[in-house]
Amino acid sequence: MAKRRGKRSRRQRRILNPHRKIQQVIEGADFINSMPDEILNHILSFIPIDLAIRTSVLSRRWRHAWCELPCLHLRTTAKGIDQTLLSYRRLKIMSFKLCVTHKVTEPQFNSWVEFAMSRNVGELSLTGLFFYYETYGFPDCFYLSSSLRQLNLVDFDMLPGCTVSWNFLRRLTLSSCSLYDESIANILSGSPNLETLQLFYCGGLLKRLDLSKSLSLRALEIYGWSQRSGQMEIVAPHIHYLNLKNSDVAPCTLVDVSSLADAILCIGLNRYRPFKAGFQQYADVLQTIVLKMLAKLQNVERLTFCGGYLLQILSLAMLCGVRLPKLKVQSLTVQTNFARSFIPSIARLLQNSPGLKKLEVHATYVSYIKYLRISQGLDSDTCWRSKHEVFPTTSRMYSMSDCNDAKMKLLGSFLRLVLRNAKRLEKIVVWLGDSYFSDEQMERLLMVGTLSPNNNVSIEFK
């Protein structure tokens, strides 16, 4: 027993020894200082560059550690950028992001771009917001790179002064940039291995986006298109994925998307646009564009409709005697409310998709503009009263947003409509949003699945 007590007391003495604690801290610090440079750089890459620079005061070992960081993300003044780049020593930059917080001159910006290109940057992100209304032109070295893999530009005029050579570029993202037919052709021809092209709220005078020679391109995303450029034709026979979210100013026209497998379509409508002069003519043009677009998507496997206006446009077309095309879609996603003017197009899309296996519904109870009444002088609440009377009018839809019982009955009616029109459906996923149903109400909704002819439809609520 005495021997045990002696061991216990020695252990207690070791724990209570303050010098041992200090020694453990020193040993921990030595452990960090003994790490290879690659690991230290990896650790510092998770914090902002200004904090990484402050670690230089910790010890001699850390004094120049930040100077070898593989990634430089700068968001500061011109003076701060110059000071940082002056001390930076790494010869190869993996990622360089630059966002200036104050107005700069073209020579200053050129020097930073030339610095990044001289260090064989792999991922480059530049923001030109602080040139205001001045036209900035990149130096030629910017367009001649064998190291660029990803490029993200915000608010620039894309006017190459030389032949572009980005042989290894995989992803190109242009946001709020001005594009022109000749310049985009130059960029695309100089990027033979481009796989993803993203155009976000760009403008200019681009009339035709011809991607027929971009054999490696698989994904195209276009958000918003400037009215200044008008309607843009898209020729993209090799892409597999298309995400097209247009504002109401100038929807794009699909010419060739023959390899497309996955498409997301969204057409927004400015709340004041329907009340402006000439909306009737614009609505006719918009309907024609949407119908032609849908015809080009007959062979896609996954199709998504975002926003309610697209569905209302299709309902209006049906009311005018237009037949919607047959689709080979296997997975359909719609964002919609359950007002009467949305239902006809949804029902017809289900009927025209005989191979449909999965339907995903993002339910919303917001009140959309009465598109039919404004564009054609029709009352969307009475056009389909006899056939779809169980679904509410647009105005009544808004009043149901706070009534869960009404929502549950409406959702049940919608599920029954789906099961009547989609014969081979295997799964329905419903995103309820801010709606909440009790366990009893959920069970009653799930019982609707047993009404399917094959009795094998799975219903899931999220």
Image (tube, grey):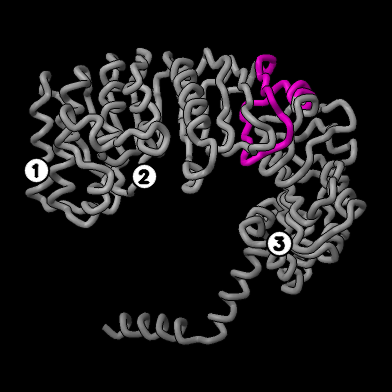
- Is disc 1 surrounded by few (<14), some (14 to 19) or many (20+) residues within 10 Å? few
- Where 296 sits versus 140, above or below? above
| Residue picked out by circle 1 | 443
> Are circles 1 and 2 on residues that touch, CB within 8 Å?
no
Type of the residue with mark 3: Ile
Q: Residue 295 falls in which quadrant of the image? A: top left
Q: Would you say residue 57 is visible in this rendering?
A: yes
Of the two numbered discs 1 and 2 on the same chain, state the one appearing first in sequence.
Answer: 2
- Where 356 sits versus 153, above or below? above
In magenta stretch: residue 440? no
Give residue 461's mark.
Answer: none
> Are circles 3 and 1 on residues that touch, CB within 8 Å?
no
Residue under the image location 26 percent in, 39 percent down: 339
| Residue picked out by circle 2 | 368
Q: Nearer the viewer, residue 313 or 273?
A: 273
Q: Secondary structure at mark 1?
A: helix
Q: Residue 171 falls in which quadrant of the image? A: top right
Question: Percent position (x, y) of residue 272?
Answer: 49, 48
Q: CA distance from mark 3 to mark 2?
A: 46 Å
Question: Percent position (x, y) of residue 298?
Answer: 42, 14
- In the visual, does 112 lie left or right of 154? right
Type of the residue with mark 1: Glu
Mark closer to the observer (3, 1):
1
| Residue picked out by circle 3 | 49
Q: Residue 108 falls in which quadrant of the image? A: bottom right
